[in-house]
Structures are given as C-alpha cells and as structure tokens.
Amino acid sequence: MKIGIMGSGSVGCYVGGALAAAGHMPVLVGRAAMGDRLADGILITRYDGTEHFAANGSFIFSQDVSALADCDVILVCVKSIATRSAAETLAPLAGPDALIVSLQNGISNPAVLAECLAPRNVLAGMVGFNVAEIGTNRFHCATSGEIVIGEGGGAQALVEAFDTAGIPSAVSADIESVQWGKLLYNLNNAVNTLSGMPLKRQLAIRPYRLVMAALIREALTVFKAAGIIPAKAGKAPPNLLAPILTLPNWLFLRVARGMLDVDENAKASMLLDLERGRQPEIDWLNGEIAALGRKTGVATPANDRIIALVKAAFSGEGQRAFTGEELKRAVLG
C-alpha cells in the first residue's frame, strides 16, 4: 500500500515520518521550505520518550501534487481553509481507486473532499493528539490520543499501517460522533490562542477554563437540538467536561490529570498559526457550533463572541493575548 500525504505540516510530517521509519516509503507533498527542513530526515518523538528517525531516502518529498498520482491512499492534512483547493487539484490526478482520508480539524472537510473527488472512496478521520514542531526537522507528539478512521473499504488496512508505525489508531462505525466529540475539545483552540501561552499553563488557570466550559455547554445544547450524540473523545465523557472545567483549581488539578497530561510547551495549532502569520481555522471549529446553532435556532453568544475575537486578533485589529479574567469578561460579560 503506497501512502501519500497532501499537506506536510505538523500532523502530515509526524504521520509521514512515523510511516517512513516503519518502512512504508510515504510520499509527502508540501512547500519548498518544508522540503528543505526535511533534507536531513524526519525525527519523530513522543511525550512518553519514544523516538524514531526516518532517514532521507526513506520517504519521498515533492512540491508537485502529481507525485500522489499512483498512491493507493492519500491522507489530506491541509488546513481546512485549503480543503476545496486541495481537492480540486487532486481530482484530475488521484487514481480512480485511491482511498482519500481527511485527517483535519472540524466536521465538514470530508464532505467537501467527497464532492470534489467523487466517485473515489472518501473517509473521515480524527487526529486525537497534538503535534509540535521543534527545531528544524523534529515533530513531537505532545499528548496521548489516537487516529480514528471512518468505516469503509481500505480503512482497516490503513489502521494496520498506522499501528506498525507506532501510531495508535482505530476504525469507527460512527465517525461523525467521534468528530463531534473531538470538536468539543477543539473549542479550546480559540481559548488557547487568545491566552498566548502553552496549553498546560492555560488549562491550570480557572477563568480560561470557565470560558471553555461555556463554549462546550453551548455546543451540547446545539447538539441536543440537532439530535447529535457526541462520542467520548478524551478522558472525560462529553456531559462531564464543563463541570470538570469549572472546578476550583485545587480540585481540578487532582481530578483532571488526564487533561493535563501534555508537554509543558505544547500549544494549539491555531496559536501557532497566529504566531506564524497564517489564517485561522476558527470557522471549522467554533464556527461549526455557530452554524449549527443558526440551523437549529439555538443562540450561541459565547462561541459567536470568541470567533469575533479570534478573527480580530488574526487581522491585527484586535487584542492578541488576554489574561484569563480579560477573556472571561470579553466572552461571558
């Protein structure tokens, strides 16, 4: 099985490097700058101390999407804002029997891929861990978590390839519920971005957690109205997330050890995008909740407000970093 990766960012390089180190010879497509960074190979590390190295020659890197033409599986790892463009570029190139898998944030990307790449088999996926880029060519899995792939032809073989590469993975018959469950956790990406600090430090500050709890409560209300039952995507069941987050610090630090099982320097991908001058994925995270709220007639004021704050921060027209109390006042009043 020849595996290609479109979008060689943090997740793409981590997965590609792990596959390469396991002998799979993946094809990575990305920008020239990333190709230069990977010229000496890819170093893969994990929070538990595991380390693997993919030497130059154990993978193929190209700026040309046509390098994916003969791949049996194409993992789409581009940012959500680039999904349609990537799919339209792949459409005339990908083999008719290629399996396309979305390893992206949000809910709607697989539908966009399926629309542009029909009749190819398109499966949704969920990446349940955080990847940090450290130095030139090190990609570090900073949290626990697994990749979950939707049920369908080729899914089990792909999961087996991930397993041989040391990437925990599974197939789910209800991938949408898994995606909605992960989205609840990803609502914190906006909070972390506006905090301007690593995840572990941000989660230890209660006012930030109160904002996250409000975002999650709104999301659960919208889910109920839409008939959506989110799957458990982390250490706590969805209905217990908000109550746990609102606990006083002394109790939260004891009860939520799993949530805090992250590297000291791990940051949300959206915060990294802000630091690097890129566009935010907010419309595919909190924006999914706001859009579903409009569809179901449920108000989502907290999510609406944090979307506006994130967009203002990225545009340079608003405040980039808030203390916990400042963000609580700005979002919750």
Image (cartoon, rainbow, N blue to C red):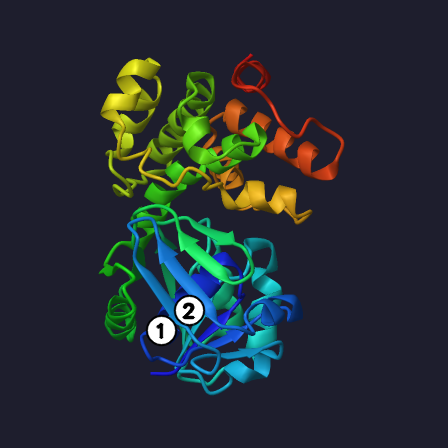
Give the residue drawn at x 32%, y 40%: 228
Location of residue 124 with respect to 299 vertically, above or below: below
Dot 1 falls on a residue whose secondary structure is: helix
Whether residue 101 appears in this view of the structure is no
Query: Which labelled disc corresponds to residue 21?
Result: 1
Dot 2 falls on a residue whose secondary structure is: helix
Give the residue drawn at x 26%, y 43%: 231
Give the residue drawn at x 33%, y 48%: 47
Q: Position of residue 278 (x, y in %)?
A: 66, 49
Location of residue 149 with respect to 205 vertically, above or below: below
Amino acid type at circle 2 is Gly
In depth, the one of 89 and 290 nearer the eye is: 89
Q: Residue furthest bottom?
A: 70
Q: Position of residue 96 (x, y in %)?
A: 44, 85
Give the residue drawn at x 59%, y 33%: 307
Left or right: residue 43 versus residue 149 is: right
Which image quarter is the N terminus in? bottom left
Query: Which labelled disc corresponds to residue 108?
Result: none
Left or right: residue 57 versus residue 313 is: left
Q: Position of residue 117 (x, y in %)?
A: 50, 73
Query: Which labelled disc corresponds to residue 17?
Result: 2
Location of residue 205 with respect to 78 vertically, above or below: above
Report the Cα–Cα distance between label 1 and label 2. Answer: 6 Å
Left or right: residue 246 versus residue 306 is: left
In depth, the one of 91 and 66 nearer the eye is: 66
In depth, the one of 255 and 37 nearer the eye is: 37
**Residues tagged 1 and 2 counted as in contact (Cβ below 8 A):** yes
Q: Position of residue 159 (x, y in %)?
A: 26, 68
